[in-house]
Image: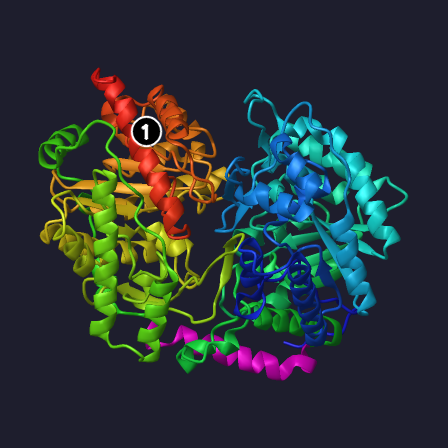
């Protein structure tokens, strides 16, 4: 197909990975926290990363570069600073030192709790939740946004500042502690709009032609009040005379009923996602009458996955879009924050598979190619199109992607395979008889601190500086230390600490067929926490046991039960880059069957408690309600398929963290786990009340120790949270545990925090038993 040239299309992106090569930003920020890097040096590192990114994007052929998307920790936290929404408990710290105060809001201090953290829509990125109340007073502080804009202008780039939009910001917010839970932050819109107006005026004065306002919250099912708020916000912002041109962006799903609202708003452009479920935006846009006279930025390159784009299909969509807008430009579907930097540095990847991969730099090149083809005609990109067709055909026909035995096993699954043999009440009695645990049993979520020595041991093994025997001796020594500490601390159900694991998904991916692990594919999860999501390239099977060796060794050191620790099938998908050539449900079933084999081997080795973590169950929930029943049906079936083959007296645990659980309470019940542990410390035991209100009948461990903060909670603080949990969950069904794994914490704070947690459990237990002094 040959298309004719049209008006010059611009190529752009909404955002870019922040960390730089080799996670340079992470190292600088953590060095600052430890006192090894000065504030000035940290700021210069950040500025250097911004300069490098802008130069690379411009050299690649982008016509506009984003500014303001760079963050030292989180872009939503940056927005809270921009609008002056600093919690009262942090205000003095922010006023004394803005940088230290900023990090205090993110991480907390020994005296002051941080902001709550939760997932950014259906991604594995975490944002800091704004805390607002009826007394909140907003004040504009555009210093960061203006400074970064001026940096880009001075370097000769065409910048487009990117801001979280006012409606999304308010919809992401929660009532501040002490504020009535019925308070609706969206009611503050009239106070917030003038602050955005001031920021927009500042950006225009600093040289911005366009400003992008991100409104991803509008792709969810919107209430009438939310749609009216969006209409009012952009009617008022659009009516401003002292402002840049406005580009309102959405992504992750179709805009639906919000599309005509934004299309009619007096703004100059919309940026829409046209990938995955958001491809429905094409028909919706046509039904809404298009965007005559306005700019449309078409997100056609998937910003959330790592597979190459089908350039011919994207050009076809672009051809249709040309008739629906005044001008059409090309972008990724969302910020490239969600993918690694550069696929070309992955030199250990099979060359055949490498042809199929596109990370941020490759996606930028695809965007530029599409914009050129749209502007100058497809003849000008004939070579790129031919190479792309060959790469797509290579993947479609590769034997690496299909295993007949795996597919036959998955097709043979029946409903009985995903059901426990005995009802919960009978299982609970059998487990009590076997485990003999006290009321309010104490445990941890699984991981213990990953020390520098452990990371060095893994690096030495990879580099051949030590052999397998030497490495295993080091792991055994760490397990002995972890088990000994737990016994001395008084924990009831122990873990082996996971010293052999680099990551809760990658570790398993490296031991399953069909997965591909990267060496440099880092993606930001939150703050300075980066992960390397593995890539699901083919059908999944388990060649040999993955965890039995270490779990059995830990159990040999103690008479107390040691949990077997696995990552669940949905989380294995959510925290990987998944296949886009088959339904997720089919891939989930393959992973579940592989994990089912591991569960069976753990039980056969004598493991009495097996935890299958599913922290991603909520984050993968479709953003629109219509898609949720089908997703939850296959997701919960995959968990049960993993766990249902065990005996009645084997206790199955699961764990979830840092998500809004209210939307999936029925699904949590449908998992049929015997015990569930959940994040609860930052949200003040909110989830315990939600589970009680929903009539959840099984055992629950709401966290009493926030592991994402360096502060050590006192025994009194943990006891107070326990007592609050007991208001919702009876003592015979309440467990005591941290919010999440302890991998990212240091040993001194872990030792102190867990000792306080056990002391709190004993104190509350004594009151319940009537033995308190």
Is 163 drawn above or below residue 426 in the view shown?
A: below
Is 157 drawn above or below residue 85 in the view shown?
A: below
Specify the quadrant of the image occupied by residue 26: bottom right
Helix, strand or loop: magenta stretch: helix
Magenta run includes residue 380: yes
- x and y percentages locating residue 232 in the rendered image: 76, 33
Specify the quadrant of the image occupied by residue 560: top left
Front residue of 483 and 621: 483
- x and y percentages locating residue 260 in the rendered image: 70, 41
Residue range in magenta is 378-400
Residue extending furthest bottom?
383
Q: In this view, does 695 lie to the left or right of 387?
A: left
Residue 640 seen in this snapshot: yes
Give the labeled residue for mark 1: 760
Q: In this view, does 284 lie to the left or right of 304?
A: right
Placement of the C terminus among the 4 image quadrants: top left
- How many C-alpha atoms fall within 10 Å of the one at disc 1: few (<14), some, or many (≥20)? many
Number of numbered discs present?
1
Placement of the N terminus among the 4 image quadrants: bottom right
Q: Residue at x 56, y 37 (%)?
A: 221
Q: Residue at x 31, y 50 (%)?
A: 568
Q: Is mark 1 on a helix, strand or loop?
A: helix
- x and y percentages locating residue 154 in the rendered image: 82, 66
| Colour style of the rendered protein structure | rainbow
Is 151 drawn above or below residue 618 in the view shown?
A: below
Residue 326 seen in this snapshot: no
Front residue of 214 and 725: 725
- x and y percentages locating residue 504 in the rendered image: 35, 56
Magenta run includes residue 106: no
């Amino acid at each position: 197909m040959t298309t004719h040239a049209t008006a010059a299309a611009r190529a752009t992106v909404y955002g870019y990975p922040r960390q730089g090569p080799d996670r340079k930003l992470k190292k600088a920020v953590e060095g600052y926290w430890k006192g090894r890097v000065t504030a000035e040096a940290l700021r210069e590192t950040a500025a250097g990363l911004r300069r490098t990114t802008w130069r690379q994007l411009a050299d690649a052929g982008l016509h506009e570069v984003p500014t303001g998307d760079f963050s030292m920790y989180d872009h939503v936290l940056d927005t809270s600073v921009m609008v002056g929404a600093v919690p009262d408990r942090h205000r003095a710290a922010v006023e004394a030192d803005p940088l230290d105060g900023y990090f205090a809001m993110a991480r907390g201090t020994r005296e002051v709790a941080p902001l709550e953290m939760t997932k950014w829509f259906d991604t594995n990125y975490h944002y800091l939740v704004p805390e607002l109340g009826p007394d909140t007073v907003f004040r504009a502080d555009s210093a960061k946004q203006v400074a970064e804009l001026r940096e880009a202008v001075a370097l000769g780039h065409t910048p487009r500042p990117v801001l979280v939009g006012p409606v999304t910001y308010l919809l992401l917010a929660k009532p501040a502690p002490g504020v009535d839970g019925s308070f609706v932050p969206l009611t503050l819109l009239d106070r917030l709009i003038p602050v955005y107006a001031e920021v927009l005026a500042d950006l225009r004065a600093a040289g911005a032609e366009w400003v992008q306002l991100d409104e991803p919250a509008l792709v969810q099912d919107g209430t009438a009040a939310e749609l009216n708020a969006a209409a009012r916000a952009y009617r008022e912002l659009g009516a401003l005379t002292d402002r840049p041109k406005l580009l309102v962006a959405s992504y992750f799903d179709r805009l639906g009923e919000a599309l005509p609202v934004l299309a009619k708003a007096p703004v100059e452009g919309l940026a829409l996602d046209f990938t995955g479920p958001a491809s429905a935006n094409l028909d919706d846009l046509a039904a809404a009458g298009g965007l005559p006279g306005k700019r449309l930025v078409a997100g056609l390159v998937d910003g959330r996955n790592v597979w190459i784009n089908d350039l011919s299909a994207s050009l076809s969509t672009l051809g249709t879009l040309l008739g629906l807008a005044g001008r059409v430009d090309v972008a990724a579907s969302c910020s490239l924050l969600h993918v690694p930097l550069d696929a070309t540095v992955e030199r250990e990847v099979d060359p055949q598979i490498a042809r199929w991969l596109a990370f941020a730099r490759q996606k930028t090149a695809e965007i530029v190619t599409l914009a050129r083809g749209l502007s100058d005609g497809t003849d000008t990109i004939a070579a790129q199109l031919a190479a792309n067709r060959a790469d797509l055909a290579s993947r479609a026909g590769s034997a690496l992607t299909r295993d007949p035995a795996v597919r036959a096993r998955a097709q043979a699954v029946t409903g009985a395979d995903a059901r426990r043999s005995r009802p919960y009440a009978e299982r609970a009695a059998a487990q009590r008889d076997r485990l003999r645990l006290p009321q309010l049993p104490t445990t941890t979520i699984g991981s213990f601190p990953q020390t520098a020595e452990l990371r060095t041991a893994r690096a030495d093994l990879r580099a051949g500086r030590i052999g397998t025997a030497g490495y295993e001796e080091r792991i055994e020594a760490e397990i002995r230390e972890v088990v000994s500490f737990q016994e001395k601390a008084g924990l009831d159900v122990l873990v082996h600490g996971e010293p052999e694991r680099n990551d809760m998904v990658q570790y398993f991916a490296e031991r399953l067929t069909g997965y591909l692990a990267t060496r440099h594919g880092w993606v930001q999860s939150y703050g300075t926490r980066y992960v390397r999501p593995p890539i699901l390239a083919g059908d999944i099977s388990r060649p040999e046991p993955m965890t039995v060796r270490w779990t059995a060794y830990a159990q040999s050191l103690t008479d107390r039960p040691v949990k077997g620790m696995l990552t669940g099938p949905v989380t294995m998908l959510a925290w990987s880059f998944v296949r886009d050539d088959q339904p997720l449900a089919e891939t989930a079933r393959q992973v579940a069957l592989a994990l089912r084999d591991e569960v069976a081997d753990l039980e056969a080795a004598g493991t009495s408690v097996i935890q299958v973590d599913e922290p991603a169950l909520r984050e993968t929930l479709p953003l629109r309600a219509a898609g949720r029943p089908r997703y939850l049906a296959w997701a919960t079936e995959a968990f049960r398929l993993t766990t249902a083959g065990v005996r009645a007296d084997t206790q199955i645990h699961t764990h979830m963290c840092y998500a809004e659980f209210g939307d999936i309470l029925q699904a949590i019940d449908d998992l049929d786990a015997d015990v569930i542990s959940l994040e609860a410390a930052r949200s003040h035991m909110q989830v315990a009340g939600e589970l009680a209100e929903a009539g959840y009948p099984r055992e629950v461990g709401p966290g009493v120790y926030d592991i994402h903060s360096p502060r050590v909670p006192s025994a009194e603080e943990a006891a107070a949270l326990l007592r609050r949990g007991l208001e919702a969950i009876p003592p015979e069904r309440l467990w005591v545990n941290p919010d999440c794994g302890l991998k990212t914490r240091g040993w001194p704070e872990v030792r102190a925090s867990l000792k306080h947690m056990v002391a709190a459990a004993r104190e509350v237990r004594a009151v319940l038993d009537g033995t308190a002094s």
